[in-house]
Amino acid sequence: MAKSKILLIYTGGTIGMMQDVKTGSLKPFDFKSLTNQVPELKKFDVELSSISFEKPIDSSNMHKDVWVKLANIIKEKYNKFDGFVILHGSDTMSFTASALSFMLENLSKPVILTGSQLPIGIIRTDGKENLITAIEIAAAKHKGKSIVQEVCIYFEYKLYRGNRTFKYNSEHFDAFKSPNYPFLAEAGVEIQYNERALLKQNKKALKVHAELDNSILVLKLFPGLNEKITSSLINTKGIKAIIIETFGAGNATTQEWFVNELKSAIAKGIVILNVTQCHEGRVVQGMYETSSQLKRIGVVSGHDITYESAVAKLMFLLGQKLPVKKLKDLLEKNLRGEITSS
Ligand code: ASP
């Protein structure tokens, strides 16, 4: 059988750093000598190519234009490769994975994001295992077809659906969680795939959506929200969508001023999405009196979507320039496995 062709795309982040022998400082790794840095890669039965961003970035500088650039690289190289591994800083990896999941419709090849907490040039690095296994997963096929056909994050022995994850630990190697969806694979002596959790193959051609709109406000609620500040934020010019990060099962204050502000925003055509501050569980508008008013005025339920995925989904849907009604319908719909249909 022909070797799988994998494209490695280095965007930046800790993984691509190595220690300068003379100065001891961390500097970006030269990807042309990748197999010298990680000799284990030579043992792989995989044809590996790599491209690196000219100026690698710390993922805190991630931006929608970079997502468009990544989606376009994948579009351009899609037919030449069997899978893609994106090396990315862990800080905003969940946002990028979520964004790509929406931008790459009908994906039938793996797009695996990985990174590390320690640079690849450091002896105790977690980067080598993450990189090697991510490549192995991207190359894995069954009966000639990729086993994984979606955008994932591979980190510390686990493969996750990217748009279900969030970074929860800045120190542990085990940095990601996906509380509302099981992991897709676990790497031990062998890589065990969780077949039932994987997205099913789609026979349609890849469609890349390269338009994103970031006219979004995120309003994280807290007890005793300041009326003046909150009202002024909601009335900021140019906002097309607001994510309200609510308590528990999607609850918020019932104070009149707050409900009225949301109501008048909705009347102006602004979409309001209810996402819970809890990492596990879901929004159920109407379960408590403190969320009934949101349902009544037309706030959209985010169900069990993560905050990261909500941001990406809104940018993607706003980029489609859809009528508000259609946008709201799609927000509540499961598009790429990002929400569990109730
Ligand atoms: N600040 C780094 C980044 O996200 C951290 C990491 O790479 O894990 O780019």
Image: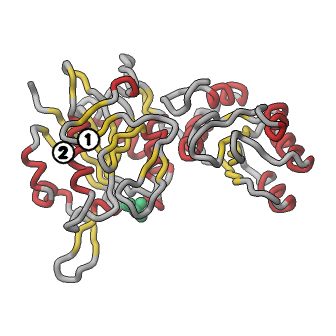
CB under 8 Å between callouts 1 and 2?
no
178 vs 140: above or below? below
Mark-to-mark CA distance, 1 and 2: 23 Å
73 vs 105: above or below? below
Measuring from the top left, give residue 296's x and y in whole percent. 84, 31
235 vs 23: above or below? above
Measuring from the top left, give residue 130's x and y in whole percent. 27, 50
> Residue drawn 38% across and 60% down?
172
Q: Is residue 164 left or right of residue 327?
A: left
Q: Which mark is residue 49?
A: 2
Ligand 1 quadrant? bottom left
SS label for mark 1: strand
Which residue reaches farthest right? Answer: 256
> Residue drawn 70% across and 28% down?
323
Which mark is in front, 1 or 2? 1
Type of the residue with mark 1? Ala
- 230 and 278: which one is in front? 278
Q: Residues within 10 Å of mark 1 (few under 14, many from 20)?
A: some
For residue 236, which quarter of the picture? bottom right
The N terminus sits in image quarter: top left
Measuring from the top left, give residue 11's x and y in whole percent. 34, 55
Disc 1 under 8 Å from ligand 1? The reply is no
Type of the residue with mark 2? Ser
> Residue drawn 66% across and 30% down?
327
State whether residue 99 appears in this view: no
- 272 and 57: which one is in front? 272
- The image's colour scheme reads secondary structure
State whether residue 151 appears in this view: yes
- What residue would you read off at disc 1? 187
> Residue drawn 64% across and 28% down?
332
The C terminus sits in image quarter: top right
Disc 2 under 8 Å from ligand 1? The reply is no
